[in-house]
Image: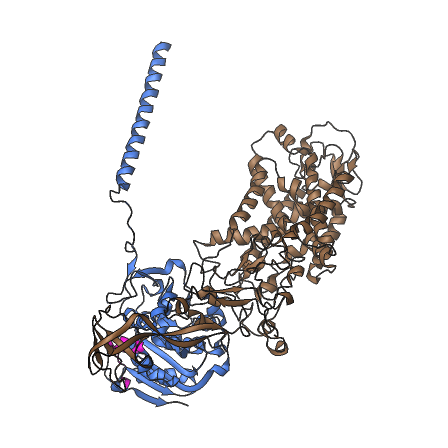
Chain colours: A brown, B blue
Amino acid sequence: MKIVTTRRISQAFFFTLFLWFCIVSTVGEKFWQLRRWPVDWFAQLDPLVAIGTALATHKLYWPLLWALVTIILTIIFGRFFCGWVCPFGTLHHFVGYLGNRRKTAAQKIRLNRYRKAQCIKYFILVIFLSMAAFPSLAATLQTGLLDPIPLLTRSFNLLLLPVLDRPVSFISATARFSEGAWLILAIFLTAVLLNLLIPRFYCRFICPLGELFGVLGRSAIWRIGKKQADCTDCKLCEKSCEGACLPSGGIRISECVLCFNCRRDCPDELIAYRTTPSLAGEVTNPDISRRGFVLSLAGGVFAVPAVRLSNKLGSNWHHKVIRPPGSLPEEQFLTRCIKCGQCMRVCPTNVIQPAGIEGGLENLWTPVLNFRIGSSGCQLNCTVGKGLPTDLVPCGKVCPTSAIRPITLAEKLGLDEFADVGPIKLGTAFFDRNRCLPWAMDKPCIVCEENCPLSPKAIYTQECFNTVRDGVLTVKETAGNIINVDQALVPAKFATGDYYCAVDGEHRVKIAANTENSIELSPGERFEKVPAAGGKIEIQVRLQRPYVDIEKCIGCGVCEHECPVSGKKAVRVSAEGETRSADRRLLLER
Amino acid sequence: MTEQNDKNLVRRRFLSRLGKAGLSIAAAGVIAHRLYDNKGPELGVQSEDMVTFPDFSVEPQPGRTMSIVNGPDRVKTVNKAIELLGGIGRFVEKGKTVAIKPNVAFASPAFLGATANPQLVAELVKLCYRAGAKKVFVTDNPINDPASCFRWTGIAEAAANAGAKVVLPCANLFRHTTLTDGKLIRNWPVFFGPFENVDTLIGIAPVKHHVRAGASMTMKNFYGLLGGRRNIFHQDINTIIAELSMMVKPTLVILDGTEVMMTNGPTGGSVSDLKRKNTLIASTDMVAADSYGCTLLDLKPSDLPYLAKAENAGTGTTDYESLKPRRAVVS
């Protein structure tokens, strides 16, 4: 089999596998659901994830050891990942091929020539890594913005799957939503369409991971090169060169993605992949100046404190940055989260959403809970399994970097060995008494209380009776259960079972029905002292007004999700009191 | 000669253009005529997908409206309870399609009793197949995430193992309905799709405490058929529950009081909220079933205004003793 065919099979395989992992990121037991599929394997293979988190946390989280395999293979073979494995690379490769296949050989050669600007990705890499590398100054991991694996995971899971699944409802019965997906769409589309201008535009100019491989593969043992210094200089080797790495002359090893098209296209079979460097010479180092390196390093170091001037990690923290259960304290969270969106994808209720920038620029696309979207709040008993205390909570299970720790249901709920610590609180619910129906409008409701999943409930009610507007009536006469009144009433208005007729504001009897000028009391109920003609009665509504027991509330947001005041909810969760950060606590004692 | 040819060519091209232009003008005219709207848009127009739930009820048989069976084992009590009403054959005919509507409202494990018991659901499915049913669906439109509710309650697995198809509430299964004598259910989206070509409807609900409504039982179970922003109906909970009993006329309802949620309902969340009462009711009259069921919560039917409302609307009786319910004990 030709090596180019092998490469194509490898690309197709890994692309399909990647797609498959996106599809199976649905909690469930069917073969096309989560089960034990290693859906975060691509992120684990990604050395930028491993190196980025290691720089920022000084630790290598154990599943990221997979990256070592990629690194070792890169040191031996060069940038094989870009040309053979990377699903985003495969997409660019394919689109670039489709968009440029009608062009002449000369045009293609021109498109695939080496450009000085290909060093931009080196600066991007240095900026990102320097942002993560100095915890003493303030570190933040932002590689996920442009790292191709998180970028593609995010784009597929939060953008393409919800749109494609909408008409068929295969992956989810209820529609899935992604807040601010337009920005994810814009970036994804731009990256893909740029291939029509220059093939593999993203890989050549932007990709920080590609650059990392370029650096790692500088002294690769095997490399592409010419078997003799001189040739006819037909440049056909550059016709389909994916890396734009100049195989015809002094090949740029750090740009070569090992597509092997040059080897296939050389009419004289002068190009080989072997341990001997190209006899036409080669350039192993990325094309950058020391000044450029220092500038991007300094830029990255300066950027973090600059962004943090808005003090979003201090007193100006945004109350809507409510993290999934098991998330690390904010500062540590930002040194691990790669914005891949897997937690959002796997969340059965779709309540985990990509953040915008209101919680700070660094927060973009990190997971936050938005209780206005999705099919429920953060469900109390949510696990990847059947709901046993030892089962893992889905969002933490799929997090490749443990920004959301893989917690068990027992830890989430504070059961068994976690009984002393208590349940994980995501925040606290607050009532807006100016909007709440029973508080502000004297209407019965308490959907929040009904749905509070805790036992005993964190939302409780207190009963009160309020006289309705124009509810003081003059009795005309009383006949058995019927009281005729002077005032005109709206027929059946007080027949809901929630209205009472009170004498002296205290002694109350439930109203069964009313006409324009009479009130019928519930059968079997009587006033002790029948109101006499000319006396006053009051119509009162029985209200159950909701309160939050702040010591019980875990901030799951089911109440906010169900609140029928739909514009701006009358009960809203904010992150005060969240377990993960001591400085956001609300109460003196736990 | 060539001049002549040129002239012919010019004429032919002109005629061809003339033809195309004519067709385009005609097409534009036809489209405009077809879409012509001389009124402009109106607000609040009735939805176009209006439906009415079919009447699933069976011919009443005196003395066989309601049965109350005591015993700890739901499989035994439900079999006995249905047998006392004349056997499953009275409700499920050979070759017919059955929809079972358990209460699957919450994503909580079965042992917390916030949802219909999965064993009970599975037993009903098996009974239907034993009676010769062609197809049995189990469906609900829960409060929490539908797939999660069916998964963690164990109802999805139990129903599937018994051979039933679980139908989740996809958007395309909702239609609009208006209840003729209703005040609240007017042009309202309902979960109708699964019931469209169904002959038999069986409701299964546990007896649960409910702060707003007093109790959640077989009538409240059909809240699950409402779509849209159904939470606003909590402002008038008694009327909406009574209207549900007018909107849906099930073949049979099973009210499970084996373990009754006495407090903290309807979500529960702790086994300490449950109390063993070892009672199971089968009934063709939801009002009667719920009127008896509320006594398990130490309530009187008059404590639940929706029962009187439903009775006034003629959907059943609160005086369940008048139906001479059949009783039995199975250990």
Furthest toward the front, the residue is A534
Instruction: Establish if A321 lies above or below A104.
Output: below
Return the x and y of residue B115 as percentages of the image width and height. 44, 75
- Residue at 30% x, 65% y is B185
Looking at the picture, tell me which residue is in the foreground, A445 or B247. Answer: A445
Taking the image as shown, residue A541 lies to the left or right of residue A477, namely right
Q: Is residue A419 visible?
A: yes
Looking at the picture, tell me which residue is in the foreground, A212 or A528. Answer: A528
Q: Is residue B307 magenta?
A: yes
Taking the image as shown, residue A554 lies to the left or right of residue A295, namely left
Return the x and y of residue A481 as percentages of the image width and height. 22, 81
Q: Give the image quarter of residue A466.
A: bottom left
Q: Quadrant of the C terminus of chain A?
A: bottom right
Q: Is residue A590 magenta?
A: no
Q: How many marks?
A: 0
Taking the image as shown, residue B308 lies to the left or right of residue A133, namely left
Looking at the picture, tell me which residue is in the foreground, A318 or A554. Answer: A318
Q: Is residue B95 visible?
A: no
Return the x and y of residue B306 as percentages of the image width and height. 31, 76
Residue range of the region highlighted in magenta in the rendering: B305-320
Return the x and y of residue B169 as percentages of the image width and height. 41, 63
Looking at the picture, tell me which residue is in the foreground, A353 or A331. Answer: A331
- Residue at 41% x, 75% y is B121
Instruction: Establish if A217 lies above or below B160.
Output: above
Q: Give the image quarter of residue B251.
A: bottom left
Instruction: Establish if A422 lies above or below A45.
Output: below
Q: Quadrant of the N terminus of chain A?
A: top right
